[in-house]
Image: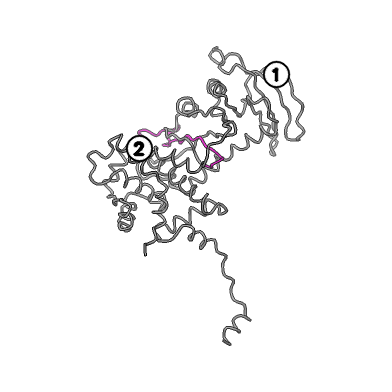
Amino acid sequence: MQDQATVFSQALQHIPWGVLNREAMARRADKGVRRLDCRSHPAALLIAQCFGARGLRDIEAAMKVHAGGLSRRGIVPARRSTLSDADRSRDPALFEALIPPLLAQLRPKALDVTRRELRLIDATLVHPGAGAAAWARFEAGLVAAKVHVVYDPAIEAPTFFQLTSANTNDITVAKTGVPITPGATYVFDLGYYDYRFWGDLAAAGCRLVTRLKKNTRITVIGARPKPADADLLADTIVRLPPKTGRNRRNPFDRDGRVVEVRLESGRILRLFTNDLTSSPRQIADLYKKRWDIELFFRVMKQTLRIKTFIGRSENAVRLQIVAAMIVYIIMKIIHQRTAPDVPFTNFVAMMAFSLFHRIRIAAVIAHATRPALRPPTTATLQYELLI
């Protein structure tokens, strides 16, 4: 009778190992490597995420204890010094290549109309420790890095991320690194207030929804019918200033629209969009959807290991972020297929506690979500004593 694979081994089956092998051969990533190849290294990083390892010694101990099970998948336990060297020198792009095919498992088929796709853009701070001061800097001497993310709420996963020092402006990454999906809708906050970026989105046929700064001088072209909802105050067609602050031509030279929304706190938001056809309620709801990426950041920091870092070099921190993203996507794939009704944070905890148990993942979920047995009543106890 064949032994049941461990939960960790079942999770690893979702990794496109063929893609990793091709990338490793193309980059000659295993040339001269004797102890920790490109198959064992990501396994060590994933174990660190799932176990919440506090350091390299924890990873070494976990892999040593479970060496037998790992060897069946061709994974060699990593020593602390070897793993430290690999984290410092191995190119994270090798493992980043795994993310697109993993995302494809979350999206079973491409959407027919790309305009329906929604992209949320934002960034969050992480703190790799004082040892990262050589590359991670922020104001007032704070050592921090920034993870820039493009998030797809339809699959509840990031489609792009980039690690920079915390003093890198969000818009710098958006203009130089963020891939633009033609026809998609992009929602973002004031950190991406740049007319050139807006113009690039509009030129690609994209819809954008963002906030308008208070001091932006707009020209009102015409007013649309007043929205019926009490929290929607106005809906107007506008033009942005023809010149930028440096007296250059504004790249966003087309009509826009401002929808004013009153929050429950009484604060008024002025939302700007290039969508001239949707209702003001739809525009307001799109901007409200931006909260999903904040929830994603919270889940990542609560369930995975990106609040404390094992390495301090930029390469090691980037590898840890990549590993966290891979684990998150794999967990989303398994969660989607086996337990969509279970809260995701609870699901991740169930997986972590049973990582090296030889049990089917579906059985783990069934056992963990089984209703608790009621304590026996007095009458039941008396009956059991009689028989």
Which residues fall within the magenta stretch? 134-156
Residue 212's tag is none
Label 1: how many Cα within 10 Å (few below 14, some 14–19, many 20+)? some
Say which residue label 1 marks: 220
Of circles 2 and 1, the one toward us is 2
Image height check: is 236 above or below 319? above
Give the quarter of the figure containing the N terminus.
bottom left
Looking at the picture, tell me which residue is in the foreground, 125 or 15. Answer: 15
For the residue marked with disc 2, what is the amino acid? Answer: Leu
For the residue marked with disc 1, what is the amino acid? Answer: Val
- Magenta region includes residue 142: yes
Residue 94's tag is 2
Give the quarter of the figure containing the C terminus.
bottom right
Q: Secondary structure at mark 1?
A: strand
Image height check: is 111 above or below 13? above
Looking at the picture, tell me which residue is in the foreground, 135 or 198. Answer: 198
Position of 251 with respect to 58 (left or right) is right
Image height check: is 8 above or below 248? below
